[in-house]
Amino acid sequence: MIQVSRADTSTVGRWWWTVDRWTLAALLTLIGFGYVMMLAASPAVAERIGAASRNMFFIRQIAYLALAASVMVLVSMLTVKQVRMLAWFGLASSLLLVAATLVVGAEIKGARRWIALPGIGSLQPSEFLKPCFAVVAAWLIAEGKLNRRHGATALAVLLFIVSAALLQRQPDIGMLLVVTAVFFAQFFVAGLNMLVVVVAGVGGVAAAFGAYFLFPHVQSRVQRFLDPNADNYQAEVALEAFGNGGLLGRGPGEGRIKNVLPDAHADFVFAVAGEEFGLVVCLVILALFAFVVVRGLVRLLGESDLFVVLACAGLLTQFGLQSFINMASTLHLIPTKGMTLPFVSYGGSSVVAIALGMGMLLALTRRRLSRTEDDR
């Protein structure tokens, strides 16, 4: 345990006594689960695809998770003003890179979501768009509501339309769903007129039907989810894994489903946890995600800064919704959607982007003795 004196006025000292240490501990615990799950699931996947080393994914994820933890802690030390500036820079860079994927991005399974950058390798810029957009949109909405700057609200809507158009072109309907949910959750928290809420809801339903008829892969997943006789191989194998695990699991390394389940180290890592560690550990993982979201919302009850409230509400909505989509699709409660489980699934872009968002959350929810601390 870190020992820091309350009299310590250094950056680290002030950070330690103002940051939400319970949320930080929960997030670091999830990162710990990420290490364990990569050790359990990734070697079998590497062998199945014929990788040069069976530890290839695990070694990479060690580096990704270490980087993610560092990013989260460093970003959590920023002031509110610095978080806002970082979000603007991140959003501008992400939008440019997402647009670049449509031109020079590698096409994988009919989608262009990845771009190769010198010295970095493959990057999925849309992952970084999510947290940065949530913070920027929160600031613009707050400016429009508090200072009657209607141009700021219009700019927020314009940025959403541009982001949505780029995500639709990739296409990445799951990411578009998350960004849309975050944006409208922020408007709702800001006191959006109920008539507008109803219109937006109707528009969302219409968009869902549109996605069903316009995108064959969306239609296929929905039909396979609704038809009990359809080919639902991944979902069926995942459910079999939970059945094999029972209450306490078969034991670390004793799972068999990871040898045949596609993306066992990524989108379906929760099924591997269910087989090897059982219902108890799955409930612990679920409780950690719920704790982060609920504690974050509770801390906002005493917050008077509308920007902080909206930004944190957006970041928590994003974090909770992504977690729900991954676990619910693994349990066949919703149509299958390729979305990672935060900090637990394999993926460099995903874990670092989530760490960026959670670092912003920790920075924005730090106890501030005065408004002047925001500008330090």
Image (cartoon, helix red, strand yellow):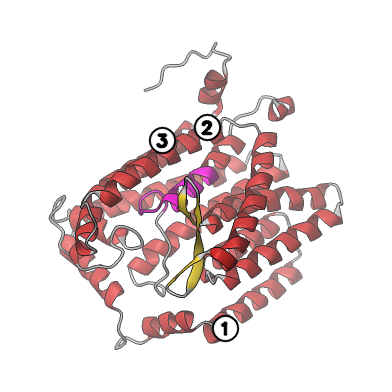
CA distance for labels 3 and 2: 15 Å
**Label 2: few (<14), some or many (≥20) within 10 Å?**
some
Where is residue 367 drawn, in percent x and y? 60, 29
Provide the secondary structure element on which disc 2 rests: helix
Residue lying at 52% horizontally and 32% vertically, measured from the top left: 74
Residue 37 showing in the rendered view: no
Query: 72 and 55: which one is in front?
Result: 55
- Circle number at residue 74: 2
How would you rate the neighbour count of disc 3 (Cα within 10 Å): few for under 14, some for 14-19, many for 20 or more? Answer: few
* Residue 12 % position (x, y): 52, 21
Whether residue 115 is situated above or below residue 307 in the rendered picture: below
Q: Is residue 26 left or right of residue 80?
A: left
**Label 1 vs label 3, nearer the camera:** 1
Closer mark to the observer between disc 3 and disc 2? 2
Looking at the magenta stretch, what is its main secondary structure? helix
Residue 125 part of the magenta-drawn span: no
Residue type, label 1: Phe
Q: Residue 60 placed where, x, y %?
A: 33, 46
